[in-house]
Image: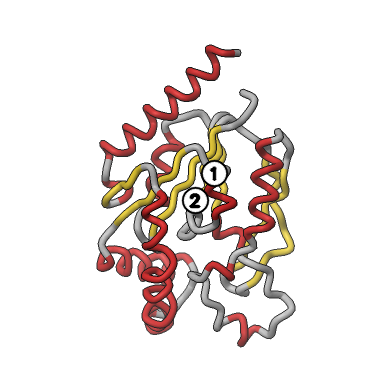
Amino acid sequence: MRDKPVVIGVAGGSGSGKTSVTRSIYNRFSDKTILVIEQDYYYKDQSHLPFDERLNTNYDHPLAFDNDLLIEHVHDLLNHKEIKKPIYDYKLHTRSSEVEKVSPKDVIILEGILILEDPRLLDLMDIKVFVDTDADLRIIRRLLRDIKERGRTLDSVIDQYLNNVRPSHLQFVEPTKRYADIIIPEGGQNHVAIDLMATKIEHILAKYQSNE
């Protein structure tokens, strides 16, 4: 492992395909090389709140995230220290009591809707990516994901999109595009952009390996 791992931020609206982009990049390399840290795992703990109140949480607002903990963990990884990554329980709408032990690797990908929103996180990134996808595709993908994977009803997903997701996207997510070094249209379907990202990572790793 080199002195300082490469940190890549991958942002974009909910359903934009940022997870597909991240997975595609991850699959190009050995799992010993790349570590993925999902911002979704760092939603704030809500165990102190009644369940009905948890349901009203706006998960697309910057205040929903425990960025202090995320930044602490990134610093630990950069200093080659193991972290205990939190796990979020979407059915209970709070942080799980379980954690996942994670060791540092040569490349750290930080992935999430607002991963480019916090200046402290931006300062830690070597490459900043924004996945830009039309709103109609994003809502369809979100509907399919939340109903199939998170046990949500159609009405609840639509209500959340109209009241929280769309307003927060326009206010908080979309403006972070200006911080991106690379903008990838259409997410995981953009194989050319993913190839370019993988080549860039290979170039960076090769450069540091040659200096060892």
Q: Quadrant of residue 43?
A: bottom right
Residue at horizontal 73 percent and vertical 40 percent from the top: 82
Query: Which image quadrant: the N terminus?
Result: top right
- Locate residue 74: give its quadrant: top right
Q: Residue at the spot x=61%, y=87% of the render?
A: 52
Q: How many marks?
A: 2
Asked if labels 2 and 1 touch by Cβ distance under 8 angstroms, the answer is yes
**Distance CA(mark 1)–CA(mark 2):** 7 Å
| Quadrant position of residue 208 | top right
Q: Is residue 34 above or below residue 182?
A: above
Other residues around mark 1 within 10 Å, as few (<14) / some (14–19) / many (≥20): some
User: Residue 49 at x, y = what percent?
Assistant: 70, 82
On screen, residue 121 versus residue 23, left or right, reads right
For label 1, the residue is: 36
Relative image position of residue 51 (x, y in whole percent):
64, 83
**Left or right: residue 15 compared with residue 211:** left
Give the amino acid type for the residue marked by disc 2 in the picture. Answer: Glu
Secondary structure state at the residue bearing disc 2: strand
Label drawn at residue 18: none
Q: Which three-letter amino acid code belongs to the residue tagged 1?
A: Val
Closer to us: 76 or 158: 76
N-terminal of the two: label 1 or label 2?
1
Residue 111, which numbered label? 2
Q: Secondary structure at mark 1?
A: strand
Give 94 or 167, whichever is nearer the viewer: 167
